[in-house]
Amino acid sequence: MKVQSLWLADEKDEKIQTLNQSINVDVLIIGGGITGISTLYHLKNSDLKICLVEQNIIGHGVTGRTTGKINYLQGTVYRDLVNKYSLEVAEAYLLSQLDAIKQIKRIIKKENIDCNFEKVDSYVFSSKLKDINKLLEEKAILEKLGIKVIDSQTKKGYAIGVTDTYVFHPLKYLRALKKICIEAGKEIFEKTKIYKIKKDQQLYICYTKDYVIRTKKIIFACHYPFFILPYLMPLKTYTEKSIITASLANYKTKTLLSSSNPCQSIRYYQDDHSYMIYLSNSHNICNSLNENKNYKQTIIEANDLGLKPLYIWKNDDLITVDKMPYIGKIQKHNEQLLIGTGYNTWGMTNGTLAGMILSDIILGRKNEYEKLFNPLRTSCLSDIDKYMINVGSSMKGFIQNKLFKNKSWYDEKVKVVMHKGKSIGIYDDGEKHMVYNKCPHMGCSLIFNEVEKTWDCPCHASRFDIDGKCIKGPSVYDISYKDEF
Ligand SMILES: Cc1cc2nc3c(=O)[nH]c(=O)nc-3n(C[C@H](O)[C@H](O)[C@H](O)COP(=O)(O)OP(=O)(O)OC[C@H]3O[C@@H](n4cnc5c(N)ncnc54)[C@H](O)[C@@H]3O)c2cc1C
C-alpha cells in the first residue's frame, strides 16, 4: 500500500519556475491550492501585475489530498445555518454553492479540461435517531428552498440525496488552470515560500529565502495563515483531520457521506482503473493522537466494505465557528490584505467561490457573496463560547503533549529526549533523524505519525518530515536538529 494521495500518484514531472530575483507586483497571491489558482484564473486577463507563489508544487497542499466531491449537500449545513442565522442566510449559502458548481462546470467546458468530471447522485445518511431527525430537518429546509430531495432507507440507515452533484480529479483541474494562467502571462513561482511580511509605507514586503516581493495587495490563499496577528485564526477555527484510502473497485457508487461523527464518506473515481475512495476517522486534530491506530482502523473499515486499499493518506481542513468560510478583508479599513479559507471540508465549491469573490474585490467589482463570507462578520462576536472551545481544545493538545512526549504506542524507533535543555524527537531507522520537538508556529510539542513518517502538530496541523523540513503550515520554519548526540 502506498502512503500517498491517489491524486498525487499520477503527478508527472512538470517544468516549474522558482523566484530568482526580487520583484514588484500589484497583487501577490500566496498559495497554489484551489483558492489561489482559482483567484489567479479570474484575474488572468487583468492588466495588473499579479504573481502567485507556492512553497511546494501547485496542488500539493490540502487540495491534493481532498476527496474531490463537488457538492452542495454538505451534511446538515443548511439546518445549522437556519438555527444559527436564518432561512435567508441558509438560502444565500445554498445559492453560493450552486453558483460555484456552475462556475466549475463552465470553466471545465470553456477550457476543455480533462479532469474526470462526472455527474453523480449524492446522499447523506445516518443510522442514529438524533441524526436522522436532523436529516429530516435538512430535507425540509432544502425543499423549502426549491431543491428536489430524494429520501431512502439504505443498509446504512436513513438517507437524503440530490442528483445534480459532481466528482473530479482535483489536481488535473488545478494543473490545467495553472497552464492557462501561465499562457495568459501571469507568473507562478513554485518552491517559493513566503517567510515573513513587513509593511513599508503603502507597500508590503514579502520575504522569501533569497529575495523579496514588494506588493500593493496580498491574497492569503495559504489555507492556514502563517501569521497569528492580525486575524487570530487559532481562535476562529479548529482543524479537523481524516484518513482516506483508495482501493480498486469494479462497481460504481453514489457519493455517500455520514452525518454522524466521526464522519465517513465514499466516492467513486474512474480513470484507467476504477477506484473507491473511502474516508473515515474524522477528528479534531487535538484528539485521537495515535495516528497508527487511526490509519489501521480506517483500513479495517475499508476491508469490512470489501475494499483493499492501495493508497492511504491523511488530510485536514479548517472548521469555522459558524460553518461558513472566511473570504474577504482581514482588517476593517485595510483593502490590501485579503484571505480565503475556513471551508469546513467543502473547499472545491468554497475555494472556487473565493476565487470569484477575491478577484472581484481586487478589480473593484461588486460581488453578491462578499457580505455573506466577510471574515469580519459581526455575528462572529456571538461565538465567543466557540472561540473558547477552540482555544481549549488546542490547549488540551498542547498540555497533553508537553506532559507525555513519549507515547505508549511509539515503536522503539521513535523517542523524545531532552538534550541541552531542548526536547528532541528522534526517528532511528539505522540512521538517526533528529528534530526539535516544538512547532515554531505556537510552540506545541509534536506527535510522530508512524505511517506517513512525519512529525505532526496536534494544535494547528503543521507537519514536518523526519529530518525536520516543514512540509505543511501554518509553520513556515524547519525544525531540523543537527547537534552531536
Ligand atoms: C479529509 C478531507 C476531505 C475533503 N474532501 C473534500 C471534498 O470532497 N470536496 C470538497 O469540496 N472539499 C473537500 N475537502 C476540503 C478541501 O480539500 C479544502 O478545503 C481545500 O482543498 C483547501 O484549499 P486551499 O486552496 O485553501 O488550501 P491548499 O490546497 O492547502 O492550498 C494552500 C497552499 O498554500 C501553500 N502555502 C502555505 N503557506 C505558504 C507560504 N508561506 N508561502 C507559499 N506558499 C504557501 C501550501 O503549500 C498550499 O499548497 C476535504 C478536506 C479534508 C480534510
Image (spheres, grey):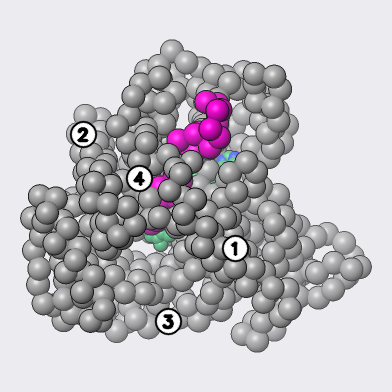
Q: State which quadrant residue 151 falls in.
A: bottom left
Tell me how far mark 4 sits from mark 2, CA to CA: 16 Å
| Residue closest to the eye, 201 or 49 | 201
Which stretch appears magenta? Answer: 325-345
- What residue sits right under mark 4 in the picture? 350
Q: State which quadrant residue 456 falls in.
A: bottom right
- Foreground label between 3 and 4: 4
Tell me how far mark 2 sits from mark 1, CA to CA: 41 Å
- What residue sits right under mark 2 in the picture? 106
Task: Determine if the C-beta at disc 4 is less than 8 A from ligand 1.
Answer: yes
- What residue sits right under mark 3 in the picture? 297
Could you tell me which residue is drawn at 60 percent across and 48 percent down? Answer: 232
Q: Position of residue 296 (x, y in %)?
A: 45, 80
Tag 4's secondary structure?
A: helix
Residue 391: mark: 1
Q: Where is 271 relative to 337, above or below?
A: below
Residue at the bottom extreme, as displayed: 408
Contact (Cβ within 8 Å) of mark 3 with mark 4 = no
Contact (Cβ within 8 Å) of mark 4 with mark 2 = no
- Foreground label between 1 and 3: 1
Contact (Cβ within 8 Å) of mark 2 with mark 3 = no
- Foreground label between 4 and 2: 4
Q: Earlier in the sequence, mark 1 or mark 4?
A: 4
Residue type at mark 4 is Asn
Estimate how packed mark 2 is, as few (under 14), some (14 to 19) or many (20 or more) residues with alpha carbons within 10 Å: few
Tell me how far mark 2 sits from mark 3, CA to CA: 39 Å
